[in-house]
């Protein structure tokens, strides 16, 4: 799955927007507005209509700059003055950019320009299904009008642990991640504090949502929305909330929303043994997590959401996002767990210290990423079935291409109950026990541990029943074989 990019330099990107595109909206004091979801919807619609009129006068050829001089055909990343490489894959068809850079005959120049222009249009129109260069005939709807009231009612309870993200995704017509983040940014006062442009914010969130693969049973935009809702709950824990800055909150929410963006539906060992270009790019170290981070940075720059902030601040935000997203690498579980235990044993966590706060944000994101066993049974079971389905699909791929089947990916041997029991015992339970030590006996921590233990007990019962049924079938088969032997006059 190639990583596509247009080889833009951030300097050229900044000059283009600065010279050609007027501000999306006049300076407005957001502090005076008490925003609810319907107001956000109406404001985005109005802003985009005005922006559409401005964009209508821009020449089509200038929708995207030409490749920067000196960029090689194999380099699919952006480098900004901050020094952070970024990736940006699009939802448009995969095209080998080497074909665009290897044309030597003069007769091919016209075709080359046409293809580049086509790519520019694809990139522009796929940046968002809602915010397009041409105003659609029908009015823009962030939510279906029939369900707007129900979705708004659910958002009023977004801080509750029994929040049903699957229902919310249906009520928002598959836009759960965008709608949730718009609401949380407004609830936490981030739009006003950072003076964010609502259209740019929406564009960035749509990019993130659309760069998740909907065909993945587990690693999709609904999982990202679920992790974001869990992160919101953790950020409200008194032990943490009393020390968090607006920057901490924004970092936590953005990292949660984008922590698995462009996940291919297979794990790191699969990418390594198939010699995937991402494994080579990141030298087999936190391959997926590095890709999620760099893709997020690319989308932040493309949307220009933070372009109005000082360069030093945007550089710090990009680096901290990387630190948070890289912490979700399951191979680093023991590293973070040991460090958390040491802090709690020594009672030396000082959340006034920015480094300690960042570490606890990493722990919170790790908890949010694997919190499925701590949800109520109906939701937990659904997530368990989805993640195992994704494992089994990878196993089927490995079987098809005669590769060694990865652990947990063999549907004939690895059952859902056995996978979940092992995950809860060795991964989830140790982490959430330490998280409860940190937060104290809060209602949320008690609920999560209670659900975790109940769910584990249910999976144990199901596992026992499966083994019993399997043994019964085995015995039944043996008895039939013995009966056949006796009928043929042989000894059993």
Image (spheres, rainbow, N blue to C red):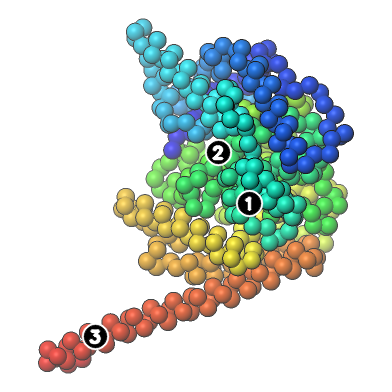
Question: Residue 210 — which label?
Answer: 2
Q: Nearer the viewer, residue 129 or 215?
A: 129
Task: Name the N-terminal-most of marks 2 and 1.
Answer: 1
Question: What secondary structure is marked by label 3?
Answer: helix
Task: Name the N-terminal-most of marks 1 and 3.
Answer: 1
Left or right: 404 in relation to 327: left
- Whether residue 379 is visible here, answered yes or no, is yes
Residue at 83 percent across and 57 percent down: it is 238
Q: Residue at the top extreme?
A: 106
Q: Nearer the viewer, residue 228 or 126?
A: 126
Q: Residue at the left extreme?
A: 489
Q: Nearer the viewer, residue 324 or 165?
A: 165
Residue at 66 percent across and 13 percent down: it is 20
Residue at 56 percent across and 18 percent down: it is 64
Left or right: 345 in relation to 401: right
Q: Position of residue 227 (x, y in %)?
A: 64, 52
Question: What secondary structure is marked by label 2?
Answer: helix
Question: Residue 480 — which label?
Answer: 3
Task: Name the N-terminal-most of marks 2 and 3.
Answer: 2
Q: Quadrant of residue 383?
A: bottom right
Q: Position of residue 98 (x, y in %)?
A: 41, 23
Residue at 85 percent across and 29 percent down: it is 29
Residue at mark 1:
168
Residues under numbered marks 2 and 1 in contact, where contact means CB atoms less than 8 Å apart: no
Cα separation, mark 2 vs mark 1, equals 17 Å
């Amino acid at each position: 799955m190639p990583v596509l990019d247009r080889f833009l330099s951030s300097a050229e990107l900044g000059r283009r927007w600065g010279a050609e595109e007027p501000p999306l909206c006049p300076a407005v004091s957001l502090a005076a507005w008490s925003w609810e979801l319907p107001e956000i919807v109406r404001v985005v619609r109005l802003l985009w209509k005005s922006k559409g009129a401005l964009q209508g006068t821009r020449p089509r050829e200038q929708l995207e700059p030409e490749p920067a001089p000196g960029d090689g055909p194999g380099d699919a990343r952006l480098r900004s003055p901050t020094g952070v490489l970024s990736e940006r894959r699009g939802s448009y068809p995969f095209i080998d950019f080497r074909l665009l850079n290897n044309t030597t005959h003069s007769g091919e120049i016209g075709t080359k320009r046409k293809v580049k222009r086509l790519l520019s249009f694809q990139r522009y129109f796929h940046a968002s299904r809602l915010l397009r260069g041409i105003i659609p005939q029908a009015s823009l709807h962030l939510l279906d009008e029939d369900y707007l009231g129900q979705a708004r009612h659910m958002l009023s309870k977004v801080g509750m642990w029994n929040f049903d993200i699957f229902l919310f995704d249906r009520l928002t017509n598959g836009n759960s991640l965008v709608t949730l983040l718009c609401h949380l940014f407004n609830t936490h006062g981030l739009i006003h504090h950072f003076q964010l442009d609502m259209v740019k914010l929406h564009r960035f969130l749509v990019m993130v949502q659309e760069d998740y693969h909907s065909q993945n049973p587990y690693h999709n935009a609904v999982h990202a929305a679920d992790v974001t809702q869990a992160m919101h709950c953790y950020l409200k824990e008194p032990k943490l909330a009393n020390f968090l800055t607006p920057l901490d909150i924004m970092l936590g929410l953005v990292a949660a929303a984008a922590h698995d963006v462009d996940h291919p539906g297979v794990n790191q060992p699969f990418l390594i043994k198939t010699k995937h270009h991402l494994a080579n790019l990141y030298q087999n170290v936190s391959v997926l997590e590095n890709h999620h981070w760099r893709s997020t940075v690319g989308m932040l720059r493309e949307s220009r959401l933070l372009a109005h902030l000082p360069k030093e601040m945007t550089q710090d935000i990009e680096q901290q996002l990387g630190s948070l997203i890289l912490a979700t690498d399951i191979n680093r579980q023991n590293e973070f767990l040991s460090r958390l235990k040491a802090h709690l044993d020594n009672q030396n966590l000082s959340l006034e210290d920015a480094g300690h706060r960042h570490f606890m944000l990493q722990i919170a994101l790790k908890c949010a990423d694997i919190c499925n066993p701590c949800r109520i049974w109906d939701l937990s079971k659904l997530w368990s079935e989805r993640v195992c389905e994704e494992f089994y699909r990878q196993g089927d791929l490995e079987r098809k291409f005669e590769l060694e089947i990865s652990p947990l990916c063999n549907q004939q041997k690895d059952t859902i109950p056995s996978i979940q029991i092992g995950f809860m015992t060795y991964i989830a339970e140790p982490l959430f026990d330490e998280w409860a030590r940190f937060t104290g006996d809060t209602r949320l921590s008690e609920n999560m541990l209670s659900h975790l233990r109940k769910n584990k007990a249910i999976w144990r019962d199901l596992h026992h029943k499966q083994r019993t049924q399997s043994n019964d079938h085995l015995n039944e088969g043996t008895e039939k074989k013995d009966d056949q032997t006796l009928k043929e006059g042989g000894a059993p």
